[in-house]
Amino acid sequence: MSQVTKRALEQSLKNLLLKKPLTKITVSDIAADCGINRMTFYYHFKDIYDLVEWACLEDAKRALDEKKTCDTWQQGLLQIFEAVQQNKPFILNVYRCVHREQVEKYLQPLVDHLLLDIIQEKSGGMTVRDEDKQFIAQIYSYIFIGLMLDWIKEDMREDPQNIVDRLAKLITGSISAALARFQL
């Protein structure tokens, strides 16, 4: 039941964001739109930004579902772009109302997890320290998140498939090459 309530709160927030900016929405507004009392909201989230973070993470997790291998990372990244695009009013409103760093904070764990899974797969049979794998993932994460944030800032005009295809041309083989340079 808890997930159902959280999803209903998320939908109410998204409905309200179509009408006014995030900074003008209150917990009472969300509760009223959802048909619950304020205490129910606070049972699930500490504040509106906690709900925003949860909604962003849930959308991204659904987009990445089982797309965490060398063969499927492009599809996973494309699905993140598409999920963001499907929630364009929500994402643009959040992006404009919170600092870029906050949006980056939402994306970072998801992208890092995707990249670490790929790096683990690529490093099979190699002896590479975990901190070096994390460093490589961090570098690629900056690229992915930077591209995503710039795309959002530019009002999501460019076709996500084009971005992912160009990125694939740039980095194909580079993760294996980086791992080889860090091999003990």
Image (cartoon, rainbow, N blue to C red):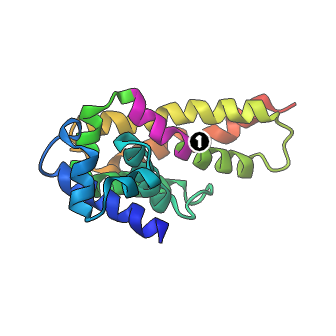
Residue 136 or 165: which is nearer the viewer? 136
Residue 181 or 72: which is nearer the viewer? 72
The quarter of the rendered structure image containing the C terminus is top right
**x 35%, y 57%: residue:** 83
**x 40%, y 65%: residue:** 5
Q: Residues within 10 Å of mark 1 (few under 14, many from 20)?
A: many
**x 59%, y 41%: residue:** 112
Residue 15 or 145: which is nearer the viewer? 15
What kind of residue is marked 1?
Asp
| Residue 106 in the image, given as x and y percentages of width and height | 46, 40
Q: Main secondary structure of the magenta part?
A: helix
Q: Secondary structure at mark 1?
A: helix
| Residue 143 in the image, given as x and y percentages of width and height | 48, 33
* Magenta span includes 80: no
Name the residue tied to disc 1. Answer: 112
Residue 3 or 175: which is nearer the viewer? 3
Q: Is 22 positioned to the left or the right of 76 in the image? A: left
Q: Is residue 176 visible?
A: yes
Q: Is residue 165 visible?
A: no
| Residue 101 in the image, given as x and y percentages of width and height | 41, 27
30 versus 116 height, above or below: below
**Magenta stretch, residue numbers:** 101-110
92 versus 41 height, above or below: above
